[in-house]
Amino acid sequence: MATHHIQERRPDPDALLALADKHNRGRLLVFLGAAPGVGKTYAMLQRAQSLKKNGVDILVGLVETHGRKDTEDMLAGLDILPRKQIAFKDRLI
C-alpha cells in the first residue's frame, strides 16, 4: 500500500519531458577515466570554472577531492549542493 501512495505522487515522465521541451535543455558531459588519479575531477572542475566565467549556472552535486589541495581550490566560487544528512545508528552521516 505504501508503494501505491508513492507512485501516486510521482510526476508523469511524459509531462516532465514536454515541460523540458518548452525550455532550454541542459547538457550532460561525462568525464571517463580508467584509473584513479588521472585528472577526471580536476578536468571537470576546470570545465565548470570556464563555463561559470562565461555566465553558465553551475551547481556541483558531489565531488570527492581525495584531500588534493589543487582539486579543492578548483571549487572556489562554485555553488555546491549540500549533502543530505542521514541518521544511522544514533548519529548523522
Image (cartoon, rainbow, N blue to C red):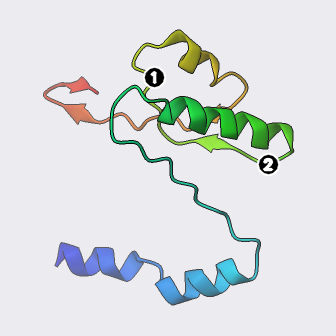
Disc sitting over residue 16 in the figure: none
Residue 65 circle label:
1
Of residue 5 and residue 13, the one placed in the foreground of this image is 13
Residue 82 placed where, x, y %?
A: 51, 34
Q: Residue at x 40, y 38 (%)?
A: 84
Q: Amino acid at mark 1?
A: Thr
Task: Judge whether 9 appears above or below 73 on screen.
Answer: below
Asked if residue 64 can be seen in this view, the reply is yes
- Please report whichever mark, 1 or 2, sits nearer to the chain's N-terminal start: 2
Q: Residues within 10 Å of mark 2 (few under 14, many from 20)?
A: few
Tag 2 residue: 56
- The structure residue drawn at horizontal position 40% and vertical position 76%, both measured from the top left corner, is 9
Residue 63: percent from left, percent from top: 47, 33
| Residues under numbered marks 1 and 2 in contact, where contact means CB atoms less than 8 Å apart | no
Query: Would you place residue 44 above or below residue 64 in this image?
Result: below
Query: Tag count in the figure?
Result: 2
Q: Is residue 52 above or below residue 13?
A: above
Residue farthest right in this picture: 54
Extreme residue in the left direction: 89
For the C terminus, the image quarter is top left
> How many other residues sit within 10 Å of disc 1, few (<14), some (14-19) or many (≥20)?
some
Corner quadrant of residue 92: top left
Q: Is residue 7 above or below residue 33?
A: below
